[in-house]
Amino acid sequence: MDAMPEGQEFKINKSVLNKIEHHAGLGLTQEQISAILGVAPQTLSTKKQDHPEIQEAISRGRAKTVGALSSSLLESSKSSVQAQIFALKNLSPESWSERQQPLVNVNLGRLSDSQLLDEIRQDPAMTNALGGFLEQDTNSNTNP
């Protein structure tokens, strides 16, 4: 689309919203979309504040693309273990993450340093996570 003629007002209508949705779905930035529409990026940004349907069109376009890509990924994952792992890590990160995040609940306000170290040493997960550090700490406490 060519730039709008000087002095012509940028109007929001069904055609403009369809273009915004389409180009957002292609992954274009709002700056790129404004260039296609022939308006300054600030104009699109200002119109977006007054017309929530602009942001809705952007969100719809992006959501449709994410949906299509997800569908395609799931379809291709049937023959690719790597794609299956990727999909599982993204769809269910709490179950398929490679990182373990131990849950530790300690009231630090009521413990001295030595009591805190004793609590940590009693928790096998914390002992494993801090293994080398705990040994160094024990040695540094015994040597002045």
Image (spheres, helix red, strand yellow):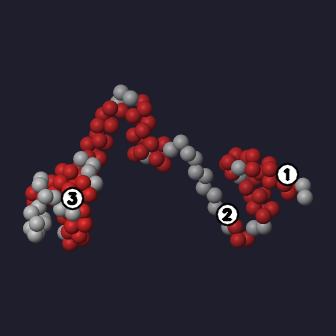
Helix, strand or loop at label 3? It is helix
- Seen at 10% across and 66% down, the residue is 6
Disc 3 designates what residue? 34
Q: How crowded is mark 3: few (under 14 residues within 10 Å), some or many (20 or more)?
A: some
Tell me which corner region of the image, top left, top right, bottom left or bottom right, holds residue 51.
Answer: bottom left
Helix, strand or loop at label 2? It is loop
3 or 2: tag closer to the N-terminus: 3
Q: Is residue 87 above or below residue 108?
A: above
How far from the left and from the top, in percent, is residue 84?
40, 35
- Seen at 60% across and 55% down, the residue is 103
Q: Residues within 10 Å of mark 1 (few under 14, many from 20)?
A: few
Q: Which of marks 1 and 2 is in front?
A: 1
Disc 3 and disc 2: Cα gap in Å? 52 Å
Do the residues under discs 3 and 2 have CB atoms within 8 angstroms?
no
- Count of picture labels: 3
Q: Nearer the viewer, residue 18 or 31?
A: 31
How far from the left and from the top, in percent, is residue 133?
75, 50
Q: Which residue occupies the extreme front position in the image?
A: 6
- Seen at 78% across and 57% down, the residue is 118
1 or 2: tag closer to the N-terminus: 2
Look at label 2 and name its amino acid. Val
Disc 1 designates what residue? 139
Helix, strand or loop at label 1? It is helix
Look at label 3 and name its amino acid. Ser
Disc 2 designates what residue? 106
Quarter of the rendering occupied by the C terminus: bottom right
Left or right, 11 with respect to 141, comes to: left
Q: Which of 34 and 131 is in front in this view?
A: 34
